[in-house]
Amino acid sequence: MPAASDVPVAVPFLRQVDTFRLLRAQRQNRRVMNSWSAVPVALLLGAAVAPLPAQAQHRHGAVRLEIAVEAASLDVALDAPLDALLGFERAPRTAAERAQVDAMFAALKAVPPPLAAPGCTLQSAEAASDVVKPGAKAAEHADLQARWRFACRDAASLRALDIGVLMKAFPRIAQVEADVATASGQFRVALKRPATELRWGR
């Protein structure tokens, strides 16, 4: 099984900053600077960075996760092109496509959830995409956002997240990239099929 690589970020963990906001600022800054060593503190604190065009952020078959690990909780946010989940990026046109959309949301909100971590129990799950709503306007590219929150016995000891159920439910996902924020640092990890476990830290 291919191992997921991880690259520690050379900046301290900042508890007072919203973790997902920090991760998104890191990702935007990497696109602009293409260098971890050049990350300005102001950007990590959420300073505005001009986003790339949607075409540069949106890659079919590739999805992103933002993972925040705290003392007793684990939060995971998913940003995925609808093509990777459905095979189309528009409102459903037939009953079969409507059923496919319903099945997608059911899989993402399922109990047990489509991802797992040792010692963690799902507390909440949500998923949304305006494009698949009836009457939605057509878009060149469309994405879905989902978020899971877990209560954990010892989240600080977590070093891995199993996404095998997610990969099985959505076979069009070919690659997963993740930004991870923990008390010991920030990491970027990635995997490609057939791997199903994201690992970080040491």
Image: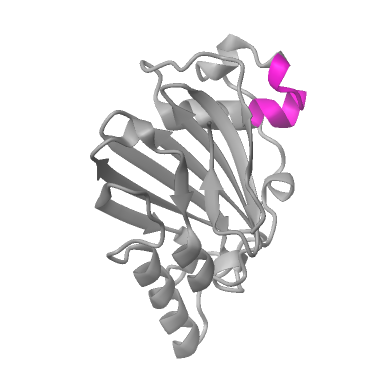
Q: Quadrant location of residue 189? A: top right
Along the line of sight, the residue nearer the viewer: 71 or 17: 71
Q: Which residues are magenta?
A: 28-37
Q: Residue at x 46, y 80 (%)?
A: 100
Q: Position of residue 159 (x, y in %)?
A: 46, 39
Q: Position of residue 154 (x, y in %)?
A: 28, 35
Point out residue 16 in the picture as x, y percentages from the top left corner: 36, 15
Give the quadrant of residue 48.
top right
What colouring style does the render use? one colour
Q: Is residue 32 highlighted in magenta?
A: yes
Q: Is residue 8 visible?
A: yes
Q: Is residue 138 visible?
A: no
Residue placed furthest toward the top: 41
Viewer-side residue, 169 vs 29: 169
Report the magenta stretch's main SS: helix
Q: Is residue 202 above or below residue 196?
A: above
Residue 148, how many percent across, how many down? 35, 49
Q: Nearer the viewer, residue 134 or 48?
A: 48
Q: Residue at x 50, y 16 (%)?
A: 45
